[in-house]
Image (cartoon, rainbow, N blue to C red):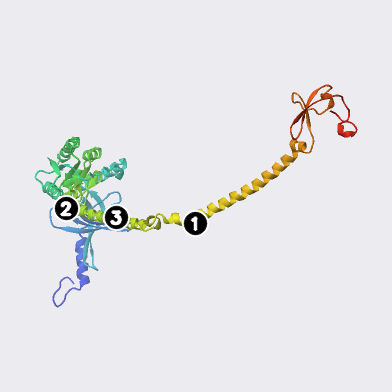
Amino acid sequence: MNTSSPEAPWPVHVVSGKVKGWVEKLGWVWIEGQVVQLNRRPGAAMAYAVLRDTNQDASVDLTMFASVLDGTDLRQGHKIVVNAKPEYWTRRGRLSFRVQQIRLAGIGELLAQVERLKRRLADEGLFDPEGKKPLPLVPGLVGLITGRESDAEKDVVQVAQARWPGVEFVIEQVAVQGPTASTQVCAALAKLDQDTAVDVIVIARGGGAVEDLLPFSDEALVRAVAAAHTPVISAIGHQADSPLLDLVADFRAATPTDAAKNLVPDAAEEAVLIDQGRTRLSAALRRRLEGEREGLAAYRARPVLADPTWIIQARAGEVETLAKDATDSIERTLTVQVAQVATLGAKLTALSPQATLDRGYALVTTERGTLVTHPDQAPAPTKLRLILAGGTLPAQSRFQSERPPWADPHQSAT
């Protein structure tokens, strides 16, 4: 069937087959465009993308084996040249291009260079979180690097001063795109970093095309930010492709407005927080005082404080009992000791020479008081003294005897 009519229409599969034949006659062609969508799942055999003409409102679907992407580091926004041929899928009536080769072109190649620089700087540690400097809680002076008369400048200044009226700015207006942008931003950064009054530096731009943001991925600028002594906030405002400045900055803000919100606290919110803190502090103090009052009342209600003499009275009986017991114990001890003294006195009396004298015996001494215990001690005529129970008598030895007088009743000594 070469023609169709209302009486002899073509079936869908016939039309689809003819379209497929016409389309595939184009063969392999080289196509240039920008990747606006990329779908590549880990482990999947196939990858899909949408390629758009950068100057016209036209796009085509791309289909490729995942291996075609190996070594390209293809990302959304890259400008590429592909070698592909059209395929028409008759089942769904869908046209796509089967890709067998991809080359980065124009901005795509620049983005690939940026990606390689990113990996190299990351290996050097320039993006490590440990190297990030903390932002000041309330900066007094903010250094702002932005375009001339830009909306980004207005957003940062107006939002920050609305949140914290006391904040002040020193603004460096520079080119934020083009071949001199990186150099001017670096110079402004060095100037603000040398000013000891500047507490934090904001580099702001209100977004833009991928190629317009390339100066913010310049290696010199990235290293300058990493070496700065003052904390740096990046506020480029481009979510799809973050420039390297976002990675090296001490804080990354999604937009200039977001940078202003993170730059200073909201005075109204802080006032509310202070009021809430005061309220909580007052409540805590009241609870503490009430607790102390209750504790003091509990102490005062104790018997020892209500009537301090009660403990003395309670112990008085014990003291009296202990005193009586002590007295009784002392008396018993004294009685026992007196008896023992009497016993010892009696023993001492019984053993003393006086007791012997009381029984009628006498002690014989010389005039010098030497006790005479043997006749040889008093040869005649030796003057002696006789110590009796009732006193002393003088005497004189007349003769000696080998035997004591009491040994022989018939002999005596005078």
Residue 275 in picture, x, y percent from top left: 20, 54
Whether residue 31 can be seen here:
no
Which residue is the site of mark 1? 317
- Structural crowding at the residue carrying mark 2, measured as other residues with C-alpha within 10 Å and reported as few (<14), some (14–19) or many (≥20): few
Residue depth check, mark 2 versus mark 3: number of the one nearer the observer? 3
Tell me the quarter of the picture where residue 196 sits: top left
Which residue is the site of mark 3? 289
329 versus 230 height, above or below = below
- Say which label, 1 or 3, has the lower sequence index: 3
Residue at the far left: name it. Answer: 149
Q: Amino acid at mark 3?
A: Leu
Residue 216 in picture, x, y percent from top left: 19, 43
Residue 268 - label? 2
Residue at the image point whose x is 17% and y is 44% from the top? 203
Quadrant of the image containing the N terminus: bottom left
Quadrant of the image containing the C terminus: top right
